Image (spheres, rainbow, N blue to C red):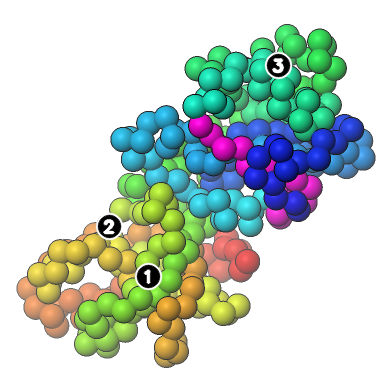
Amino acid sequence: MKIHFGVDSFQKLNSSVVTTGTFDGVHLGHKKILQKLCSISTKNSLESVLLTFTPHPRIYLFPNNNLKLINSREENLSLFEDYGINHVVFLKFDNSLSRLTYLDYVRDILIKKIGMKHMVVGYDHQFGRNREGSIESLNEISEIYSFETYEVNPVFVNNNAISSTKIRNYIEDGELEKANKFLGHNFTLFGTVVRGQGKGKELGFPTANVKIFDKNKIIPRDGVYAVYIHYNNNFYEGMMNIGPKPTFDLNDKSIEVNIFNFSQNIYNKKISIEVIKRLRSVKKFKSVNDLKLQIEQDKILSLNVLNSKKKHNNFSEK
């Protein structure tokens, strides 16, 4: 998979199949689009091209809305690669791009710069200035500019159409099981282990304090979670606490992971955390001993949750 930043670094193809969008999360709806993209690519012996944007258009257009993303750019790229896409092109989203009409976007970028002959879009895809472009718009101009349009229908889970917005809402509410079903993979946090205050070690449950790489990354609701941890090509079970430490009167929010059956020094090392299920809220206990007893119960519950997921093959070991 070749990665390009801007269309000027892209050598126009004689003929290609293209999709375009933000693809935040690369969820099951996106999966259907990407599978169609690669299917057409294989059938017609064409190179596949995915055009996306940096930064996310909503972050650029509405900076005060504090939009948080399901995936960082690097996380999305890792998922794109699984589909066998030939090219990913990042377009810089700025005033110039935001003012392009849908016609200018299709003609001047997709056709003249990329060499598009086939376009794959989701059923609700909107693009161009003021989001005026749609599947109907593409159908109207496809004959003029000699390309075929393929519309991909929505994907439903429990009669609920999948979208990145719904997944973000689930994550913010701590409903990770619902989010993971929509994603088709487990929501993951990537970060570096930093020094904390050592409270977990005092309790007999040493934790890795994690600093998340991407400032725009969405963080689940405060609480205790059952998680999987990936470190140094190994895979571990564990539990994670997001939030303050009210029992110790410490109000600063942190992300801490207790990795089961693990004793290595991993300060300044990179880890990833698959978030499986929220177990409970953060609460203030009457004593440190009460907190310790609760953490022991949290571990038991975490293991039960993770063992259940294993039995149903509902996790990724990537």
Amino acid marked by disc 1: Val
Give neighbour class at mark 1: few <14, some 14-19, many 20+ (Cα, 10 Å). many
Q: Which residues are magenta?
A: 81-94
Residue 72 as seen in the image, left or right of residue 153: left
Where does the image place residue 167, in percent across and percent down from the top left?
A: 45, 43
Circles 2 and 3: CB distance less than 8 Å? Answer: no
Seen from the viewer's position, the closer of residues 315 and 247 is 247
Q: Residue at x 24, y 83 (%)?
A: 198
Task: Give the quarter of the figure containing the C terminus.
Answer: bottom right
Where does the image place residue 99, in percent across and percent down from the top left?
A: 53, 20
Give neighbour class at mark 3: few <14, some 14-19, many 20+ (Cα, 10 Å). many
Seen from the viewer's position, the closer of residues 195 and 251 is 195
Find numbered disc 3 in the image and state the secondary structure of the residue it sits on: helix
Residue with the most extreme left position: 286
Q: Residue at x 53, y 34 (%)?
A: 93
Residue carrying label 3: 138
Q: Earlier in the sequence, mark 1 or mark 2?
A: 1
Q: How many marks?
A: 3
The answer to whether residue 304 is above or below residue 57 is below
* Residue 49 occupies quadrant: top right
Where does the image place residue 210, in percent across and percent down from the top left?
A: 37, 70
Q: Earlier in the sequence, mark 2 or mark 3?
A: 3
**Rounded to the nearest whole Å, what is the CA distance between mark 1 and mark 2?**
14 Å
Where does the image place residue 279, in percent across and percent down from the top left?
A: 32, 62
Residue carrying label 1: 210
Amino acid marked by disc 3: Leu
Residue carrying label 2: 222
